[in-house]
Image (cartoon, rainbow, N blue to C red):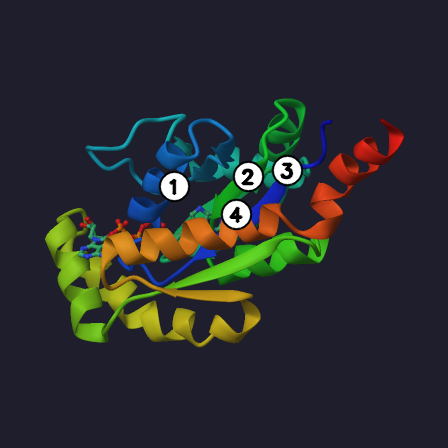
Amino acid sequence: MSRDPLLVILSSPSGAGKTTLTHRLLRDFKGAISFSVSHTTRPRRPNEVDGQDYHFTDPESFRAQVTAGEFAEWAEVHGNLYGTRVSEIERARADGKRALLFDVDYQGARQIRAKFPDAVGIFILPPSMDELRRRLESRGTESESSLERRFAKAKEEIEHYPFFDYLVLNDDLQQALAELTGIVHAELCRRHRRAPEAEQLLRE
Ligand code: ADP
Ligand code: 5GP
């Protein structure tokens, strides 16, 4: 009984904990959910794996793929280009995944929602602006200028929270993960997603 995967969009200001929560969620769902691996022109961080965290590319190739219509959405974020290829969505569909998770900014969230109105939007909030800065600093991945740019943009990102269906406060990680997991389970249990099972019973 295969059906289109639930599309889950995760957004937040940089450093609020999207990546951490995404990794935990993927681990807990043991392969039933897949992650949409974006393309980016940002340099790879030492702990990142090409093809797994991102497909790292250069601006020329990125622009050529935009022209060829290969992106379902793309945007410039913090001075770099980021985008989701249409093929990521097709692959999750072909693999029969129950859900596909996007880690994109609000511009990407809007573009995905415009194409797939059923996509569920979840915005991750940090407990405070001071804690957001601490997390960005403690991650140790950004240069001073990149850190400042990301922090300066944080409020602009948070202003977009009304666009999203759910807000998860990432103060205690376990609590935030429980909330996120609960949302995904609830969305997977929506009547239209479970109707095929009910209809099957009626045919037995
Ligand atoms: P994002 O992907 O949103 O930019 P990350 O997942 O990289 O954010 O998290 C930023 C930093 O904050 C990382 O060092 C991560 O380990 C840490 N972090 C994430 N969630 C929490 C939390 N609930 N409490 C404390 N630190 C956290
Ligand atoms: P980072 O450089 O910290 O990995 O990501 C920076 C920002 O880019 C985050 O807000 C992240 O959600 C966003 N981002 C990552 N991939 C994509 C994508 O494919 N499309 C869009 N629009 N934003 C993305």
Percent of width and height locating residue 108? 54, 55
What element does badge 4 sit on? helix
Percent of width and height locating residue 175? 29, 57
| Residue carrying label 2 | 100
| Residue carrying label 4 | 185
> What is the number of the mark on residue 5?
3
What element does badge 1 sit on? helix
If you read the primary sequence from the N terminus, does the residue marked by circle 2 or circle 1 appear first?
A: 1
If you read the primary sequence from the N terminus, does the residue marked by circle 1 or circle 4 appear first?
A: 1
Disc 3 residue type (three-letter): Pro
What element does badge 3 sit on? loop
Callout 4 environment at 10 Å: few (<14), some (14 to 19), or many (20+)?
A: few
If you read the primary sequence from the N terminus, does the residue marked by circle 3 or circle 1 appear first?
A: 3
Residue ID at (38%, 28%): 52
* Along the viewing direction, whichever of 40 and 64 lies nearer the viewer: 40
Mark 3 and mark 2: Cα distance apart in space: 6 Å
Determine which quarter of the picture holds residue 28: top left
| Residue carrying label 1 | 25
